[in-house]
Amino acid sequence: MNRLLILCALASAACTTTTKNTAPTKPEVTAADFYPLSIGVTWSYEVKLLGETRMIDVTTLRKNGDGFVEDSTGAQFLVDGFGVRDQKRYLLRNPIAAGTKWTNVVSVSSVEAYEILAANQPCDAPAGKWEGCVVVESRNRVEEGTTLVNEMTFAPGVGIVRLSTVLESNGKQIPQSTLALVKFKPAS
């Protein structure tokens, strides 16, 4: 009987020692880490569209009763257990890993296909440089042989730092617009 108690005590000690020697696990990065939705966050973007360049400032203003945060452009965003979304689509979905894919049905005739092209990558914009960024591509077939392609780059704790839109038509890529973060101000 004493031998059995001694063996149990040794086994228990061995398990405790093994547990103490394991490396701490790194917390999982989620879509919520890439889009701050506190009230008062401000992004300033340089937008190039149809040969014209302009600046736009976007500020989070209020949280609606349904949990969406509305910004100064009227857009509304929500972070939930699946990812970051606006009222029609998920812009970024969990898990945050290259190859993660999802689709959004935004209307009866429009289905967007998304894929995380790169995760945990460095990225930059006029506002700065970041580590741990995520690049997402969305594709939406406009008509036979024509697809609208968006590429969004998210920086952790900042949100979208770059966005480019290209029209793929008959094997050609026709640039449509770009957006680049020029200034970021977190909520105070």
Image (cartoon, rainbow, N blue to C red):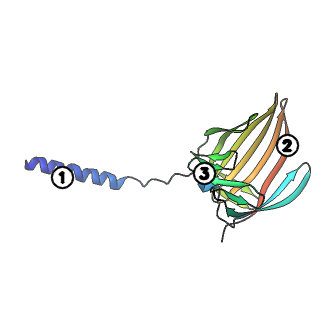
In the rendered image, the quadrant that contains the C terminus is bottom right
Single out the mark in the foreground, 2 or 3.
Answer: 3
Q: Nearer the viewer, residue 12 or 165?
A: 165
Q: Earlier in the sequence, mark 1 or mark 3?
A: 1
Residue 49 falls left or right of residue 131: right
Answer few, some or many: residues within 10 Å of disc 3's Cα (few below 14, many 20 plus, some between 14 and 19).
Answer: many
Answer few, some or many: residues within 10 Å of disc 1's Cα (few below 14, many 20 plus, some between 14 and 19).
Answer: few
Residue 95 percent across, percent down from the top left: 56, 45
Q: Which residue is mark 1?
A: 9
Is residue 120 visible to us here?
A: no
Q: Which residue is mark 2?
A: 175
Q: Nearer the viewer, residue 99 or 140?
A: 140
Q: Amino acid at mark 3?
A: Ala
Quick check: 186 above or below 1?
Answer: below
Q: Are marks 1 and 3 in contact (CB under 8 Å)?
A: no
Q: Nearer the viewer, residue 101 or 180?
A: 101
Residue 80 percent across, percent down from the top left: 58, 51
Q: Residue 31, which numbered label?
A: 3
Q: Residue at x 74, y 55 (%)?
A: 75
Q: At numbered mark 1, what does the secondary structure look like: helix, strand or loop?
A: helix
Q: Earlier in the sequence, mark 2 or mark 3?
A: 3
Q: At numbered mark 2, what does the secondary structure look like: helix, strand or loop?
A: strand
Q: CA distance from mark 1 to mark 3?
A: 44 Å
Q: CA distance from mark 2 to mark 1?
A: 69 Å
Residue 120 falls left or right of residue 124: left
